[in-house]
Amino acid sequence: MNPLIPLLVAVPLAGAFLIMILGKFVKDINKYIATLTLMFLVAATLVLMAGTGSDVAVYRLGGWDNINGIPIGIYMVSDGLSGIVLCIINVVGLLSVIYSFTYISRYTSENNYYALFCLMVAGMNGVVLSGDLFNIFVFLEIAAISSYALVAFGVGRTELEATFKYQILGGLASLIILFGIGFIYWRTKTLNMADIREVMGSETGKPLYLLVQMLLLCGFGLKAAVIPFHAWLPDAHSSAPSPISAMLSGVLIKAVGIYVLIRLFFNMFIISNETAVLITTLGTLSMVFGVFLAIGQWDIKRLLAYHSISQMGYVVMSAGMGMILLSKGIKPEVAALAVAGALFHLINHAAFKSLLFLNAGAIEYRTGTRDLKEMGGLAALMPATSSTSLVASMSISGIPPFNGFFSKLIIIIAAIMAKFYLLAVIAVLVSIITLASFLKFQRYAFYNREAANNGNNIREVPFPMVLSMVLLTLFCILLSLIAIPQVRDVVLTPAVNVLIDPHLYTSPILGM
Amino acid sequence: MTVYLLCFILFLVGLYGIITRRNLVKIVISLSIMEFSVFLFLALIGYVEGGSAPIIDPATPGGIYVDPLPQAMVLTAIVIGLATTAMLMSVIIRIYRKYKTLDVREIKNLRG
């Protein structure tokens, strides 16, 4: 019963509340409260992860214990996988808040911005920590509704159009998820994920089991923007203010989409071979189509948004390969490698994609445009932005020694060891096209001297923005260390073990 | 069984509306119809034949009660649905001020 677990949700909620009340009376207190809240969350996450280690910590709200092995009441669960995603959410959140100090001062109603930001973080922390399906739905809606408002924060024509699309598709996804939850409750009379695994375990392959799987796959696939469900992502992520784009692309689609998909299909459902193949196919399609849609874009943020779809495809594909191997019951060590590659790429993508969106925001802050054709020669004028974005571009394209190289390498090695040679080839090709697309970004934005007619008033962005970008660059380089086996054992292995062996997840919750 | 089928038909009516309507307000109404069909479904799965409200009366032990958990879920989901609808309507008002129209075919700045 670690008291930090509920505090991770309660503190940002209280922070949002305080900002709205105190912000009316005290000028500039909003950013201090937001920063302190996020700093507390980062510290609490690290303490929680260090305390939990490879165990699964269960917090029973209100002290309602199991009765005859049946969980009643609301449980919050923290294990290796939650720890990783919590780290991503809170670290990227803190850096985005620091970046927002100067960036968001161009807009009015800063109080609303910081309050909604804290609410979004509270929702995502809640999704990651909750142990039952209905709480996942509630926290997901908290995160989603605040992100709808944040996407529309500029209230221009494009922002409003993007947020309307995002809200309709997001609302549709929530309803499909709720429909699926209803079917599960109808059959099992429980909402706890570990308990559902026990109760529904004997029903694998029955029509209802498949229906529920497909409903939840569609719902969370819409939230994660896997390819047939991706239509809202480029609009929403490119129209939002840049720190919010960094949060949406770097964190939100992972916390409410990919994380829940991985958690449900590894730990709640008993995965069948057909579903695993379907998930791998969806991941591969996202990977390929995302990058082909990205390469023709001239708007920087749309280009980055399409690359998010493509990079999330890597994660879904790699996790799907793990599922296929697990469902066949062969080569468990290769399955573990594939899942580790997926989680490693998830962490890396958070670092480099939020950095790239912050770079795009910095360029927009100084030049006032997002169109690559109108930029050029920024390398000399904005050295910090230019060098950090070079590191991020090389990371996402998979150039050694940056972090993206190692995670893609692990995924490709896992594909070859599992004898999915086609997937390995596709992964390499997509990586090469990604490199081409980012060479275009670098050349047109930073090095194209002839187009440098933007006037003389372009200089480096203010210090808080540079600080966030430099810290994320350090993460891009340091995260490569996870490739070393000793570090991997500490960071990734607890999460992989929980996913590979669902018994580790269910037994502490059911008290067996 | 008929009730569940009718509930599912309501869900499909909402989905049809979202796909085919051109007016922003009508799209939101369709989304609400879908929402209510899901709420109805949740309320239905908690119903027990001949059950009464789940307040235990010590005078008549062993009575039949309906399942209270889906009702709590529906209440929570209604509040969430209210927030979503309010948010959508306020966005529609802002869209109307910028574009002077509610037709989705004319609101197409973003594509590609």
Image (tube, helix red, strand yellow):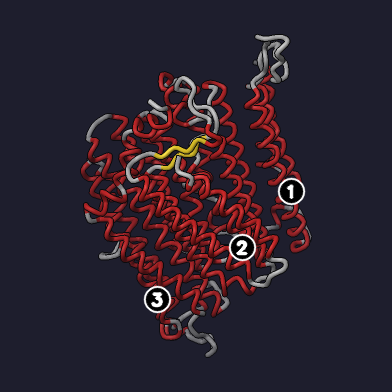
* Residue receiving disc 3: A443
User: The disc numbered 2 marks a residue on which chain?
Assistant: A
Note whether B94 is above or below A490 in the view shown: below
Residues at marks 2 and 3 on the same chain: yes
Q: Is residue A5 visible?
A: yes
* Residue receiving disc 1: B86
Label 1 is placed on what type of residue? Answer: Ala
Alpha carbon of mark 2 to alpha carbon of mark 3: how far?
Answer: 35 Å
Q: Is residue A116 left or right of residue B50?
A: left
Note whether B68 is above or below A264 in the view shown: above
| Residue A371: % across, % down | 53, 72
Q: Residue at x 27, y 39 (%)?
A: A335
Q: Residue at x 70, y 37 (%)?
A: B78
Label 3 residue SS: helix
Q: Is A76 or A306 nearer to us in this picture? A: A76
> Which tag is nearer the camera, tag 3 or tag 1?
1
Dot 2 or dot 3: first in sequence order is: 2
Q: Residue at x 58, y 59 (%)?
A: A117
